Amino acid sequence: MKRLLAFAACGLMLAPGTPALAWGSMTVPIPYIGNFNTHGCIAETAYAFVEKDPAFNSAMFPAEADVTGHEGVNVHVKGAGPDSEGSTNYAEHYYNPRNGEGSAPDSVAKYFSDLAYRNTGRQKGAAWSAHFLGDMSVPFHTHGMWGNEVRAAMASNPAALDLPPKVTGDRTILSHPFTGLLSNHSADFKVEAQRFLAATGGLAYQDWFDPWYWNGPDALPYQGSSHITWEGWAPECPPTPVSQYSSLWPGNPPPAFGNPIVPMAEVVRAFAKANARSTVASEADFLANEGEGEDQAATSVATLWRASFSGLRTDQSYTFDQASLADPNATPLAEVRGRLGNFARETARGVQVRLRVVSGACRVKTSATPDIQTYGAAPTGVRAFGDWKVEVPRGSPCRLIIEAIGAYSATPDLEIGWKNFDVTPPNATPPPPSSDCNCKPGDLMCHTLCHHNAGTPAP
Ligand SMILES: [Zn+2]
């Protein structure tokens, strides 16, 4: 009963023309009924699992309140969440695996990148990537078509808009997901298209036509649509805590030195599509048991977030060779000794550690010590590993980075850990502490510079 009231209260207050709304995302409690922040609760459920992962570190991931602070809308469909009318394109909330249309996978990948770069947009990146990925577990967000195609079709033939199942999904279950009282919708969605055209003036963000958002009775065309009535019925929170990472995860990209976020974003895009395909495959089930989609969403969000950081960590210490310091004609020689940590639950395979100069006139003496040194299989734990000779010209400080890569087969993971550090020769002024977190996505060096102080607790 509470849910029925919730649906009525929530639906009647909805402004027209907000097909981006998925599940509930309202954060304003309604007396005696509750609130409807399903996306927020999915985020909380995912967070509770990720923060227990041994590789989780609060310096590497936004605080929970900063994530949920970027979710939700008020009763006027305004707020910090992506359901805020006009803040996103409608299509960002949709992906139809039957016709390959919709922008949700791209947006999940985009906001995941913001999270993984740990730049200023990371809190919003965590929340919005989770939101668009969560939408992929809503049966009503895995069909539909581009709005402009509907506008063109209606302009050329206003008499009818016959849509195939690859656009509408299964009409026998999506027409009336719980009542069973109404007859199945015909293939003609002319009325819905007319309502869509009337309510959305063709603004750029109104780029998606969801046939099931506009099929309510005349008095309640969207509020009474099968999409909104079903979402109004859905429980606010996933019924089950997350207990493992998602079996839909396509696998981490091959580990490599260099920017790990670009290839990972591709995996994330594929993961979002896999979620949509899973939802379509279980459409009748998800429609009948709303919590199943919410459970899939929470598990997938936890998986997505875990892939934004790595269980691999590095640290180092260095000493100067006293003989090279004492000889005024010699270039001082530093010896850098590495430490390698694996904080994930599983063994990292094929682990390699590299020392490299980021800035300054230092040089790794690769003739004596190769820059890349192979460890192999690294079980969970911390060990000393890596030994490099580095020439450090007098009076010239430099910045180096020690990086470790390795493969995880069962854990979503960025598969690279790093630490930047400065080597200051005698009689040189230490460089200012690194505070340059103004990274731009795609900047190869940036993720290393940016995380100088953020990513690597001493193992
Ligand atoms: Zn949405």
Image: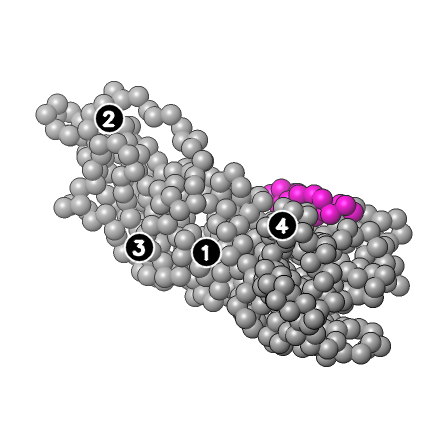
Q: Which mark is residue 265?
A: 1
Q: Quadrant of residue 381?
A: bottom left
- Which circle's residue, 2 or 1, is located before the other in the chain? 1
Q: Say which residue appears at 40% left-offset and 28% top-offset.
A: 433
Secondary structure mostly taken by the magenta-highlighted segment of the chain? loop
Start-end of magenta stretch:
61-81
Mark nearest the camera among 2 and 3 is 2
Mark 1 residue type: Ala
The answer to the question of whether label 1 and label 4 lie on touching residues, with beta carbons closer than 8 A, is: no
Which residue in the protein does label 2 denote?
Answer: 396
Mark nearest the camera among 3 and 1 is 1
Mark nearest the camera among 2 and 1 is 1
Mark 3 residue type: Gln
Q: Is residue 43 visible?
A: no
Q: Which mark is residue 77?
A: none
**Colouring mode (rainbow / by chain / secondary structure / one colour):** one colour
Cα–Cα gap, marks 1 and 4: 29 Å
For mark 1, give the secondary structure. Answer: helix
- Which circle's residue, 4 or 3, is located before the other in the chain? 4
Q: Is residue 298 left or right of residue 365?
A: right
For mark 2, give the secondary structure. Answer: loop
Mark 2 residue type: Ser
Q: Say which residue appears at 33% left-offset and 44% top-offset.
A: 402
Which residue in the protein does label 3 denote?
Answer: 352
Extreme residue in the left direction = 329
For mark 4, give the secondary structure. Answer: loop
Cα–Cα gap, marks 4 and 3: 51 Å
Mark 4 residue type: Leu
- Which circle's residue, 4 or 2, is located before the other in the chain? 4
